[in-house]
Amino acid sequence: QLRSLTLCSNSISVQGLEALAKSANLEQLRQLDLSRNSLHGSKVMALTKGDLCQGLTSLDFQQYHQTTSVSEGTAFIKALELPRIRHLNLSGAPLGARGVRELVKKDWFANIRILNLSNCRIGKVGAEILLDALDPDTLVELRLYGNTISQKLCESFQERLEHSSIHIH
């Protein structure tokens, strides 16, 4: 059974993502890399259909082109269920503070060991929400490059997560 699938830098269609999400042959899939695929709108939501994400421990969803609105990014996070996730890369997904708020509400958020929210437009409010929700005993790496976060907030992250690898600027 397939455990790792890399589909980065492809022009995957909505139908392709829907077929992938509904495939019964991927029940053992643990790592999925969909980075650099210009996923937005219905393409993004297609990933949440079916049981594909249920067994994932690693999801790389890094997007270089922010073609999705913050509203779409927030809707994606609301619909996403990753009960076994440990490594989550949402770099470039425009979450904003609302998306971060939805992310930290997820039951599975506390299980994340490596989190990349670089270039997610989280801003001061999103950073504060994230800071309050992070578990320093679980999280080992946090990436927040490209977000507008003050030096004071950066220092707060470093104090809270003193034993973790933190990349902010």
Image: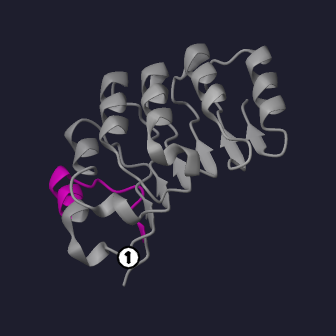
For residue 62, say whether it is visible. Answer: no
Residue that numbered label 1 is attached to: 28
Tell me where residue 97 appears, x and y as whole percent.
49, 20
Question: What range of the chain is rendered magenta?
Answer: 5-19
Q: Nearer the viewer, residue 64 or 40?
A: 40
Quarter of the figure that contains the N terminus:
bottom left
Which residue appears at 52% of the width and 23% of the height? 121
Q: Is residue 136 above or below residue 133?
A: below
13 inside magenta stretch: yes
Q: Secondary structure at mark 1?
A: loop
Tell me where residue 156 appears, x and y as whole percent.
78, 23
Tell me where residue 15 appears, x and y as whole percent.
15, 56
Tell me where residue 54 appears, x and y as whole percent.
35, 61
Q: Nearer the viewer, residue 46 or 162?
A: 162
* Quarter assignment of residue 30: bottom left
Which residue appears at 78% of the width and 45% of the height? 164
Residue 83 horizontal side relative to residue 44, left or right: right
Which residue appears at 75% of the width and 29% of the height? 157
Q: Residue furthest front?
A: 107
Quarter of the figure that contains the C terminus:
top right
* Quarter assignment of residue 70: top left
* Quarter assignment of residue 76: top left
3 inside magenta stretch: no
Q: Amino acid at mark 1?
A: Gln
Q: Is residue 97 above or below residue 79?
A: above
